[in-house]
Image (cartoon, rainbow, N blue to C red):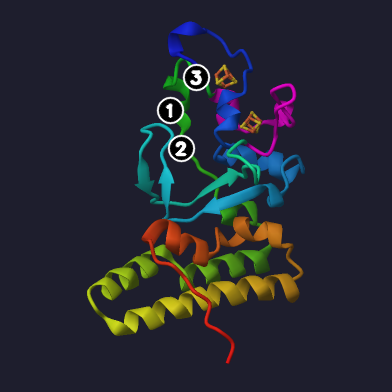
Amino acid sequence: MLKKETIAECIRCGTCCMKGGPALHDEDKQIIDQGDIPLTALYTIRKGELARDNVSGGMIRLHAEIIKIKSRPDSSACIYFNDTDASCKIYDNRPVECRTLECWNTKKIESIYAQNRLTRCLVLKTVEWLTDLVQTHEAECSLDRIQVLVKNRESGDSTATCGLSEIINYDFHLRNLAAEKGKIAPDMHDFLFGRPLSELFSHQFGVKIEKSKPE
Ligand code: SF4
Ligand code: SF4
C-alpha cells in the first residue's frame, strides 16, 4: 500500500485489490441478490480457521465465519481486479469494504471491519435445503471438533487419528455428493463448505493427508 502521507485521496492504483478481495458485510447481500457477485465468486473462511486480520495485520483464529471474494488462481489479486488498467470490474457495485477503504487513513475501515459480517445462512436464507446442507457439514466438520482431535492425537490418543479420518472422509464425500446428486457446481463448494479439509489440515495444523491406496 502507498505511504499514508503521500496521498489524500484514492488514486485508484489497485494496490489494495492486488492483496485480495474484501470480506462481505450484511449490506453487500443486495449485490449478491441482484446477481452482480455470483456465489461462485465467493469463499468462506469458517469459524475456528486461522485468517489474517487486515486491521492488526496478524493471524487470528476466527470467532465467526467470514465470506470473501475469491482471489485469482495465479495471484492474490481479487478476481474482479483488471490489471490492464488497474480497474475494478464491479466498481459501481463494489462491496462496502472497498468503498470504505482509504489507505491513507484507516479509521473508517477499522470502524466497520468486524461489524455485521455476512454469513452463509443469511445469503442462503430462502434456499432451505442448501442452508440445511451447510449446517450439517458445519456440525460434522467443525473446526472446534477438529482442534480437539488434533490435540488428543498429539497427546498420543490413537482413536483421534481415526476420528480425524472420518471427518476428512465426510467432507470429501459430501462435496462429491453435492456435485453428483445435488448438481452443485464445484466452484461453489468453497463458499458452501469452506476450503477442503485435506488442504486446511496441512495449512492450519501441519498434518499431511495421504490418500490410502486402493486394495
Ligand atoms: S485505496 Fe487502494 S486503490 Fe486507492 S490509493 Fe489506496 S491502495 Fe490505491
Ligand atoms: S471488488 Fe473491486 S474494488 Fe474490491 S478488491 Fe475487488 S477489484 Fe478491488
Q: What's the amino acid at mark 3?
A: Cys
Residue drawn 59% across and 14% down?
10
Amino acid type at circle 1 is: Ser
Residue at image position (55%, 63%) is 196
Q: First in sequence: mark 3 or mark 2?
A: 3
Number of numbered callouts drawn: 3
> Tag 1: Cα neighbours inside 10 Å, few (<14), some, or many (≥20)?
few
* Residue closer to the observer: 135 or 54: 54
Q: CA distance from mark 3 to mark 2?
A: 19 Å
Instruction: Give the residue pinned by disc 2.
Output: 115
Confirm or deny contact between disc 1 and disc 2 (CB under 8 A). yes
Circle 1 is placed at which residue position? 111
Which amino acid type is shown beneath numbered disc 2?
Gln
Q: Which mark is residue 185?
A: none
Q: Quadrant of residue 213?
A: bottom right
Left or right of 34 on screen, residue 22 = left
Residue tagged 3: 103
Q: Residue at x 62, y 18 (%)?
A: 13
The residue shown at (58%, 57%) is 121
The answer to whether residue 116 shows anywhere in this view is yes
Q: Examine the structure image and report whether residue 91 is included in the region drawn in magenta.
A: yes
Q: Which residues are magenta?
A: 78-100
- Quadrant in which the C terminus appears: bottom right
Ligand 1 has an atom within 8 Å of the beta carbon of the residue at disc 3: yes
Q: Residues within 10 Å of mark 3 (few under 14, many from 20)?
A: many
Q: Is residue 126 visible?
A: no
Ligand 1 quadrant in view: top right
Against 10, residue 117 (above or below) is below
